[in-house]
Image: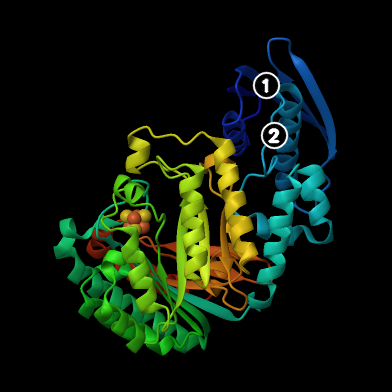
Amino acid sequence: MINFIAIEDNYTNDLMELVRALNGRLDKDFDLSLKYEFDGDRMLVSVVLGEENRTYSTEYDVTAKDKMERKRLEKRYLKESIYNAVVNYADVSLPYGCLTGIRPTKLFRELGARARDMFENEFSVSKKKADLVETTVRVQEPVRNDGDGHDVFVFIPFCPTRCAYCSFVSVAIDKQKKLIEPYVNCLLQEIEFLKEVVEKKALKIRTVYVGGGTPTSIPTEYLDKILSALVPFKPFEFTVEAGRPDTINSSVLNVLKKNGVTRISVNPQTFNDATLERIGRRHKAEMVEEVYREAKDDFDVNMDLIAMLPGESLEDFKRTVDKAVELDAENVTVHTLYLKKGSALKVDGYQSVDNDTAEKMVDYAYTALTGAGYVPYYMYRQKYTSGNLENVGYAKPDKICVYNVDIMEEDTSILAAGAAAISKKWDKSINLITRNANFKEPLEYVKHFDTVMERQRAFWLEEE
Ligand code: SF4
């Protein structure tokens, strides 16, 4: 474990992310102190390690076109210095080297022709992960937004029960029944407003995504009202995160079909019944198969799996991947367990520290899915992911879920409605995103709905 001492604290938070990832791989304790100073556009970084004060010094050129780029370079070089010093001192490595951050594909694209070289030789990303990022960037290219398209996102924060690993804003439906109707009423008003924005500004909508929570957990008549309100956006992709199989039945599927939904998610997470019980999901693996078979002729299906769930061995996870391959869903996203504050597992002190197994699991998923004709098409990383790995979405050729690409690559404006929803405006000319976040908690969203609407009006309709 590294005891991190920074003389300057400008970048401490960012650097701590790397230190935390390294700590997940270290089996000895030592101090690390960081100093840096400037001589014009030269930055001299010194990293001093351990009781023996072993010092690693490197000089970098931080010439930049503006302040923002300069800050980015300084931060990048500090990470590189820390990573290289620790690798030398303690003989560890991380699959993504010194790269932190959620969106490796976005960075890869921004770096242009030198990206591959920089990933491997400057950031020390392993060849395997550099290949994955490069392939993902190439695969998603044909569906990328040309700059004019917009997406619509609607959030429904109710679930049948709360999963043990969940840190999202979502409430168990039995406990919040009274909130559903007022919530849906507010949501419908907000959607109406977004329609006005689309008409007034003649916006082109690419996709509509109804996420959660589990949107299909609310009574069907409410779901019907919400979906009918979304039909006029005329997206080419209309997704509903059905998620939990215990919320899907023939009448729900009929409502989805009637409103022109093109894609749903049916998320097994695991095909192991014992694990499902352990993580607080009230259904059996068999139910996922039944629902999937009922839905697959009418919809493209997204499936989420999670590596490193509590109590699961490599063999358990392999069986789950094999079953997903056998079912042949259009999209399979493989998450690596990450636990944020607020999840029951985190509160209970669960830690998934077996990096070796985590790597074997994601490697197996890659081999099995690409071997079955899937291609990786979007990916992201999170701060507390087991093994400091990643989440990867795989799709059958021509079956990419476009919304997943848009949200990860941040090159599409999003009109968002509901609690915790964040509207985003992307200015292509300067590659800048501005955001408007709604109240996070559903009850707050309903209580302060006037404020929600005021902020939305100001965000979307006031002259820029
Ligand atoms: S279904 Fe998703 S949003 Fe709902 S409790 Fe489980 S993890 Fe959280």
Residue shown at 75% from the left, 43% from the top: 123
| Circle 1 Cα neighbour tier, 10 Å, few/some/many (<14 / 14–19 / ≥20) | some
- Badge 2 local density, few (<14 within 10 Å), some, or many (20+)? many
x and y, in percent, of residue 260 in the image: 39, 87
In this view, the residue in front, 119 or 361, is 361
The residue that disc 2 covers is 93
User: Disc 1 designates what residue?
Assistant: 33
Q: CA distance from mark 1 to mark 2?
A: 19 Å
Q: In the rendered view, does 340 fall on the left or right side of 433? A: left
Quadrant in which the C terminus is drawn: bottom right
Q: Given this view, does label 1 or label 2 mark the residue nearer the observer?
A: 2
- Quarter of the rendered image showing ligand 1: bottom left
The amino acid on which the numbered mark 2 sits, given as a three-letter code, is: Ser
- Looking at the rendered structure, the number of numbered marks drawn on it comes to 2
Observer-nearest of 389 and 187? 389
* Residue 82 makes an appearance in the image: yes
SS for dot 1: strand
Q: Under tag 2, what secondary structure? A: loop
Q: Nearer the viewer, residue 68 or 49?
A: 49
Please, what is the three-letter code of the amino acid marked with disc 1? Ser
